[in-house]
């Protein structure tokens, strides 16, 4: 029991980062993959896990060693054009992601309470998040996000409410299947983009700095701190991968086998489950979408705020009150309003969800290459540069993400 308590205390930024990866945008991407291609993309969860874990550990270590977020480390040690390139690549994708998540939560709220229009739910969730972000201190925000991760466990229940062919599932998990056409490659890049998401890189590094400050650990980074960080990140990424696996499994069996191959939104996925897998599966899926949105949107808006405030040298941090870091909280508020406004600009939540994942897939190689360079820079990292194994995984992630993006561009243009 004491070991479990200690392990729960270790869990923090890594668990929150991993859980927030399975946001409504991710759920929509995984649902589309399952509905369109059955179990053919299950194997991606095994490939994604070590790559996710390696990159997030690098980001966490950058935060611990430099006592700065990823943007701060870039600003201090690299030319300004590199910093601005990162900002240009990150800003549109994160805003679209926030907008898509808010729209997805609103649509699912409308499914549960049909008499209330989806846009009212979107406005309600945006307002609630804004108030909580501004008024809750960091400790409560971190604890709330940590416990919200439990919501994702609902996706582990849903497949067991439906008869499964476990031999077929095992084959699809361990034997990769690839179709060389534009649609399949788009879904593949979308899956990789939504699992290895650039906004998580910034959040992970900044949260490690916040955690160190909160615990008042102004000591030298040591092996124990690095070990605890790795445990936290590994558990968070495992959790994320398992949830991803079960969402593809649910839609790949329930929907695909029932002839439903086109799922464009999270509410469609939830609604399609209702007649096929029963009310309980439908309710669990829908509630999970709202819970993951409440978890992921603060992470998304927080990531963007850290990027912008560190770029311009403004005070930042969830551990600070509003009057101590006005710019930081104002940027978070603006990002939520911009995300919400996508509902009024005629931008389809369907396209926003999928395009966000693909945009992440296209931009991730640039950021991964920067992270690898920082992680191997002795001037920045001292004795905590990457191990050979970390570099193998990191460069594997870079190569896979780059190849996927190049193939997708080729298929789009030809």
Image (tube, grey):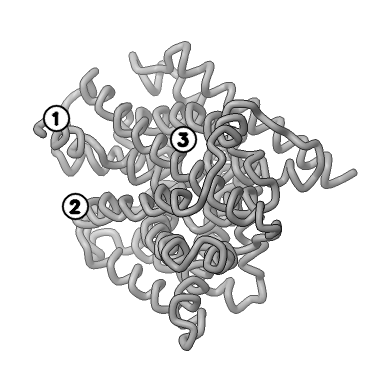
Depth check, front residue: 344 or 289? 289
Of the pair 294 and 259, the residue shown nearer to us: 259
Residue 115: x, y in percent?
47, 88
Residue 85 appears in the picture as rendered: no
The residue where tag 3 is placed is: 74
Residue at image mark 1? 3
Of circles 2 and 1, the one toward us is 1
Task: Find the distance from the CA under tag 3 to the CA under tag 1.
Answer: 38 Å
Residue at x 39%, y 23% (from the top left corner): 380
Q: The N terminus lies in which quarter of the figure?
A: top left
Q: Quadrant of the C terminus?
A: top right
Q: Nearer the viewer, residue 409 or 166?
A: 166
Q: Position of 135 compared to 241: left or right?
A: left
Taking the spot 57% from the left edge, 21% from the top edge, the residue there is 395
Q: What residue is disc 2 on? A: 139
Residue at the far top in the pictured view:
388
């Amino acid at each position: 029991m004491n070991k479990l308590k200690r392990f729960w205390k270790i869990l923090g930024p890594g668990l929150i980062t991993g859980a927030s990866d399975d946001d409504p945008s991710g759920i929509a991407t995984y649902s589309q993959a399952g509905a369109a291609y059955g179990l053919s993309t299950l194997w991606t969860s095994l490939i994604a896990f070590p790559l996710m874990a390696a990159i997030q550990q690098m980001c966490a270590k950058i935060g611990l060693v430099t006592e700065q977020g990823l943007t701060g480390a870039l600003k201090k040690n690299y030319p300004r054009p590199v910093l601005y390139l990162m900002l240009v690549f990150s800003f549109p994708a994160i805003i679209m992601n926030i907008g898509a998540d808010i729209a997805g939560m609103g649509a699912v709220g409308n499914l549960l309470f049909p008499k209330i229009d989806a846009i009212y739910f979107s406005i309600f969730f945006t307002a609630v998040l804004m108030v909580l972000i501004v008024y809750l201190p960091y400790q409560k925000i971190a604890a709330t996000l940590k416990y919200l991760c439990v919501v994702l466990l609902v996706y582990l229940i849903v497949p067991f409410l439906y008869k499964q062919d476990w031999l077929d599932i095992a084959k699809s998990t361990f034997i990769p299947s690839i179709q060389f056409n534009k649609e399949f490659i788009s879904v593949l890049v979308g899956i990789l983009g939504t699992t290895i998401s650039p906004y998580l890189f910034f959040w992970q590094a900044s949260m490690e700095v916040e955690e160190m400050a909160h615990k008042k650990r102004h000591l030298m980074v040591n092996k124990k701190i690095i070990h605890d960080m790795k445990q936290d990140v590994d558990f968070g990424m495992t959790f994320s991968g398992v949830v991803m696996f079960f969402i593809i499994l649910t839609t790949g069996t329930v929907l695909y086998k029932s002839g439903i191959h086109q799922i464009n939104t999270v509410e469609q996925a939830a609604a399609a489950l209702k007649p096929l897998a029963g009310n309980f599966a439908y309710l669990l899926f829908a509630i999970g979408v709202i819970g993951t949105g409440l978890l992921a949107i603060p992470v998304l808006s927080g990531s963007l705020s850290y990027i912008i405030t560190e770029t311009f040298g403004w005070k930042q941090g969830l551990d600070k009150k509003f009057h101590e870091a006005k710019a930081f909280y104002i940027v978070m508020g603006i990002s939520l309003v911009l995300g919400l406004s996508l509902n009024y600009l005629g931008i389809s939540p369907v396209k926003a969800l999928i395009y966000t994942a693909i945009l992440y897939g296209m931009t991730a190689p640039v950021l991964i290459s920067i992270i690898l360079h920082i992680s191997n820079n002795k001037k920045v990292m001292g004795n905590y540069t990457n191990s050979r194994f970390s570099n193998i995984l990191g460069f594997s992630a870079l190569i896979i993400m780059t190849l996927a993006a190049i193939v997708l561009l080729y298929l789009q243009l030809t």
